[in-house]
Amino acid sequence: MGKTKESKVNKTSKKIPGDIVAIILVLALIGAYIFYGCYSALNVDVETITAVKSTVYETIDAQALVIRDEHTVSGSSSGVTVASVNNGEKVKAGGNIAMVFSSEEDATKYSSAQELQSQLSYYEELETQASGTVTDVEQIDSDILSDVNSYIRAVGNGRYDSLLEYSDDLNERFIRRQLTIGEKIDFSQVKSDIKNQLDEINVSTCSPVDYLTTEESGIFSSYTDGFESIVDYSKATEIDAATLKSCIEKVSASENDSSSFGKLITSYEWYFCCVVPSKDTVKISDGDTLNVTLKSSDDILKCQVISGADPDLNTEETVLVLRCSDMNSRIASMRLEDIEIRYSEYEGFKIPASAVHVDDNGEKFVYALISNTVEKRSGEIIYSTKDYVVFGYDAQNSDSIRYYDQIITKGTDLHDGKVYS
């Protein structure tokens, strides 16, 4: 028998070169990117904002130097000086503004005793609080909300020195609310503890040995910065741009180096002085009363334009001087402030510029989503910037923007009557 020879067949697999794999991957990624782009362009979810009335302002932003009629007050050289009036408090000519103690220890003890006595009077007064009405409770709730908002703004603006005051106010309002709705709170133990602490201090052993008085009436502030006389108050309206800029640079570059005990502000009226471009004052005039916002706190002050709003022709800059008569401890400590001067007010529907369209006649309009249907909304634009426009409200025009319309800010192939499902 013949032998059959079996031949072995070597099976070899062919590998795809690495550079071809890389090319395929790159092409796949490009294809996926193109597909995603096309899909996104054709399937953009519609985005809207609700049309509500807003108030916007034309403004001038500036850094302002605060100039007051003020002078520093020196403490006693023979002892420890402690203020006997609060910051921002009025004092009469000949009135006491500070107490002088023989030692730091006596001053600390006396201050502690005064605080304890104040707490005792506070709790005694709360005990006499009678139950109130629903209106009283609503007012207290409103005050609580206001204090919470003030606390949050203070944290946001870094005004940590105000937090204790807001916390104390909140605590008091919560207690008053409990008492107003008829809840009983027993203060006997708290009062007993305070009385015991007062007995331990023995005020008669640490009383003041002398007092500081003032020769004129005014407003006291314990805050001084060494720039109380940087500009003559009587000549504040005459300051030129170069001088004012120099003063602002000095204040900005210097730290508080004042060693004075405090200061006395002898006039309620004080000034904001700032250098602004002359072109920015076109819509205001000397004598106008404007609202000025403090950017550090969002507080709004009413100020009168004293000078600078009617500059000479061909001058690029002008010194705007604003006079204000508001005064409190916060204002008494201001020196250099970033402010926003509001001189024109517009009320209407504030719409992002990106949501505004222009028709063939050059008329501007927006699209609103009404029950899943796109509807064209028109109206008069009363103010505009590069970021937004303000449409006026026209109750008589059925095609104008209405309250609570859902204004489309993002969408594709928008046209009147289009239905979104």
Image (tube, grey):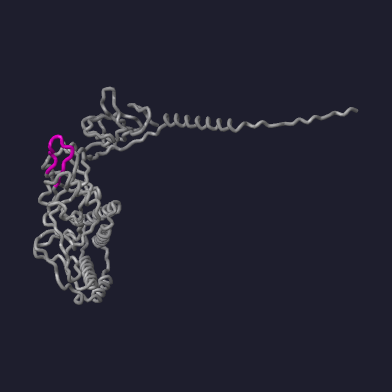
The residue lying at 23 percent from left, 39 percent from top is: 56
In this picture, residue 419 sits left or right of residue 294: right
Does 360 appear above or below 79?
above
Residue 103, relative to residue 328: is it above or below?
A: below
Q: Residue 310 lies in magenta, yes or no?
A: yes
Q: Quadrant of the N terminus?
A: top right
391, 69: nearer the viewer: 69
Instruction: Count the marks.
Output: 0
Residue 31 lies, with reference to residue 269, above or below; the image says above
Nearer to me, 244 or 287: 244
Residue 64 lies in the magenta-colored region? no
Q: Nearer the viewer, residue 141 or 78?
A: 78
- Left or right of 134, for residue 37: right
Q: Quadrant of residue 124?
A: bottom left
Q: Which residues are magenta?
A: 307-322
- Look at the image and tell me in which quarter the C terminus lies: top left
Residue 127 visible from this viewpoint: no
